[in-house]
Image (spheres, helix red, strand yellow):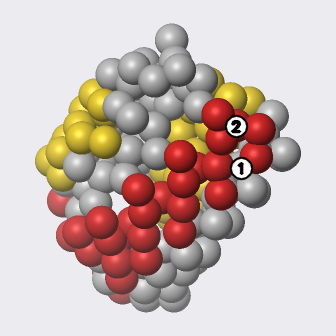
Amino acid sequence: MEIRNLRYLSILPPWDNKFSDLILQEIRLLESLNQLNLSSNVLTGEIFYFIKILTNLSLFHLFQNEFSGLIPLETRLLKSLNQLNLSSNILTGRIPYFIEILTNLSLFHLFQNELSSPIPSSIGNMTMLIEVKLHQNNLTSMIPFFVRNLKNLFIPYFFG
């Protein structure tokens, strides 16, 4: 059975399977997908542009792959997103300013990439955050002043 035939699939957790980039072409057809965890595979290139189709996602994990380039602008369209984990890749550029649009995020992990400073102060508006892990990047700021706005923050890792 091919993934493209599972149009109403809501959870796809094929993590730690050594999938290649071919699976990405199939996933773009799963508009009902709610949870996508492609962590610990062998996926490369830029984070796919078709994530804008996956607007129902609440969990989006791409941890420990070889994705490169910028965090795509289309990420801002994932308004239902509760968890975003793009850690342990080769992402570059800055943490996008539009990240504050994702007001439902409770878990935000971008650690172990090649992202550069500064950390956008707009993260301070994301009051649902419980975990923020941005360490092991090229961030040079001090501990951000906006941390005081994050009343639910339990696990903060900004540098190290």
Return the residue found at the far front: 145
| Earlier-in-chain disc, 2 versus 1 | 1
Residue at the (18%, 45%) spot, across then down: 69
The foreground one among 100 and 56 is 100
Residue for badge 1: 129
Residue at the (54%, 61%) spot, across then down: 100
Residue 35: quarter of image: bottom right
Q: Is label 1 in a helix, a strand or a loop?
A: loop
Q: Position of residue 95 (x, y in %)?
A: 38, 45
The foreground one among 119 and 36 is 119
Q: Is residue 100 above or below residue 8?
A: above
The circle on residue 38 is: none
Residue 75: quarter of image: bottom left
Q: Is residue 97 visible?
A: yes
The circle on residue 147 is: 2
The foreground one among 53 and 128 is 128
Image side of residue 74 versus residue 40, left or right: left
Residue at the (36%, 82%) spot, across then down: 53
Q: Nearer the viewer, mark 2 or mark 1?
A: 2
Q: Position of residue 93 (x, y in %)?
A: 24, 41
Image side of residue 154 versus residue 22, left or right: right
Residue 92: quarter of image: top left
Residue at the (64%, 66%) spot, across then down: 103
Few, some or many residues within 10 Å of mark 1 (<14, 14–19, 20+): many
Q: Is residue 58 visible?
A: no
Q: CA distance from mark 2 to mark 1?
A: 10 Å
Give the quarter of the figure containing the N terminus: bottom left
Return the residue found at the far right: 151
Type of the residue with mark 1: Leu
